[in-house]
Image (cartoon, grey):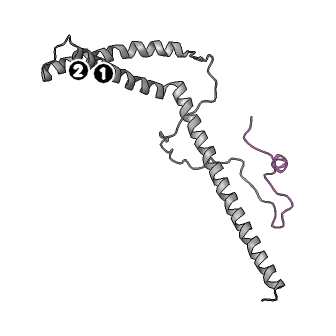
Amino acid sequence: MSNKVSYAEQIEQGLIRVNDRHGPRYVQAEVLPPAATPMLAPNTNTMITFDSQPGATSHIEVKTSFWDRAKGFTLMTSQLSLLYGAAFVVVGKVVADIPIFSIWGLLMFLIAYSVTWGFAYMQTLHYSPEGIQARESDKKLGIIELDVRKRWEYMEREQAQTLQERTEDRTEDRTRRLGGK
């Protein structure tokens, strides 16, 4: 195969312009590649994303009831409450010389146990699904109450303005009827 291109082939390929007013212009058959530019370092701070979907996916669905959460709460807090109750009885024995197996010792134990259990219950209720739902409902209700309050304030201002305009109109009518200005 020859590297030469005939004149007719050059015209067919558009390499030579035949009807040019300055005469035919010749274009070399060989075209040099552009000058080599140095490659830039790749940007490593960009996030690489893949558009392909994984072959297998998993979906975890947890279904619990209030009864299950109550059992879990009891298991988690009973040791803590017992520990605080026993610690208060020991502190009562050391600080106030209260006998361990007395009414006062039992009362200290029950108070410490109840306070610890109540605090843990309030925290658990606050972060439980029911507690989160209740807080969300309270916030939405607060927004609705604010909206209703603003609407009532607007209506009261409009009514006051309308009442004032009516009073002014009546005063003007009375003044006109009595022959005043």
Q: Is residue 92 magenta?
A: no
In the image, taking residue 6 as reference, residue 76 lies left or right, namely left
In the image, taking residue 55 as reference, residue 14 lies left or right, namely right
Give the image location of residue 176, x and y in percent: 82, 84
Read off the residue under disc 1: 111
- Tell me which segment is drawn in magenta: 1-24
Residue for point 23% across, 14% down = 103
Residue 48 higher or lower than 54, as above or below: below
* Front-most of residues 126 and 4: 126
- Earlier residue among tags 2 and 1: 2
Element assignment for label 2 = helix
Q: Residues within 10 Å of mark 2 (few under 14, many from 20)?
A: some
Give the image location of residue 167, x and y in percent: 74, 73
Residue for point 80% across, 54% down = 16
For badge 2, the amino acid type reads Phe
* Front-most of residues 181 and 62: 181
Taking the view exactly as shown, the residue that stands out farthest to the right is 19
Contact (Cβ within 8 Å) of mark 2 with mark 1: yes
In the image, taking residue 167 as reference, residue 34 lies left or right, namely left
How many numbered marks, from 0 up? 2
Quadrant (top left, top right, bottom left, bottom right) of the N terminus: top right
For badge 1, the amino acid type reads Ile
In the image, taking residue 9 as reference, residue 56 lies left or right, namely left
Quadrant (top left, top right, bottom left, bottom right) of the C terminus: bottom right
Answer with the quarter of the image where residue 129 lies: top right
Residue 59 higher or lower than 153, as above or below: above
Read off the residue under disc 2: 88
Element assignment for label 1 = helix
Answer with the quarter of the image where residue 136 lies: top right
Q: Main secondary structure of the magenta part?
A: loop
**Distance of label 2 from label 1 (alpha carbons):** 9 Å
Residue 178 higher or lower than 168, as above or below: below
